[in-house]
Image (cartoon, rainbow, N blue to C red):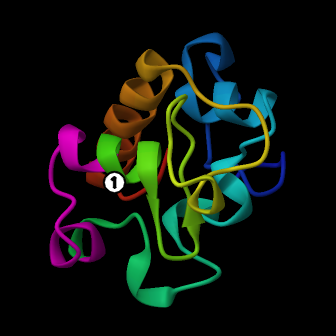
Amino acid sequence: MSRYGMLPRGAWQGAAASPWLRACGIGHCPAGCHAGGGNVLAAGASLFPDDLKRNGYTDAQSLYTLIYKGKGKMPGYGKECAPKGQCTFGPRLADEEVQSLAEYVLERAAAGWAK
């Protein structure tokens, strides 16, 4: 973890390019539920490779769909997310932001969420 709280170590470096921080900037900070790649609500649904694989999220497209539409306790963040009750009530992410965030999660997972 970084000295900035729940964000992954190094997340503040190159903040302009970090989808994680862009999501935080509009009120969708993945670090709230997924601090350090974990999951504070469902232990078996972390963002570590073993859990991602077990849950069927091994590529950017599957993660894109999860982030866009949501599932279970995780709300969807996509612009056209539906049904309304499954989606965030805050600002939505653009398609490009969802794609960048999905790719970022895979990149960080491959690195073990370490710096």
Q: Which residues are magenta?
A: 51-63
- Main SS of the magenta part reads helix
Across and down, in percent, residue 4 comes to 84, 45
Camera-side residue: 110 or 31? 31
Across and down, in percent, residue 40 comes to 64, 80
Q: Residues within 10 Å of mark 1 (few under 14, many from 20)?
A: some
- Can the viewer see residue 1 in this picture? no
The amino acid sitting under disc 1 is: Ala
Q: Quadrant of residue 34?
A: bottom right
- Can the viewer see residue 77 in this picture? yes
Q: Which residue is denoted by mark 1 in the rendering?
A: 109
Camera-side residue: 17 or 26? 26
- Quadrant containing the N terminus in the rendered view: bottom right
Q: Is residue 103 left or right of residue 100?
A: left
Say above or below: 56 vs 6: below
Camera-side residue: 13 or 98? 98
Q: Residue at x 16, y 67 (%)?
A: 56
Q: Residue at x 62, y 46 (%)?
A: 9
Across and down, in percent, residue 15 comes to 67, 19
Residue 52 included in the magenta stretch of the image: yes
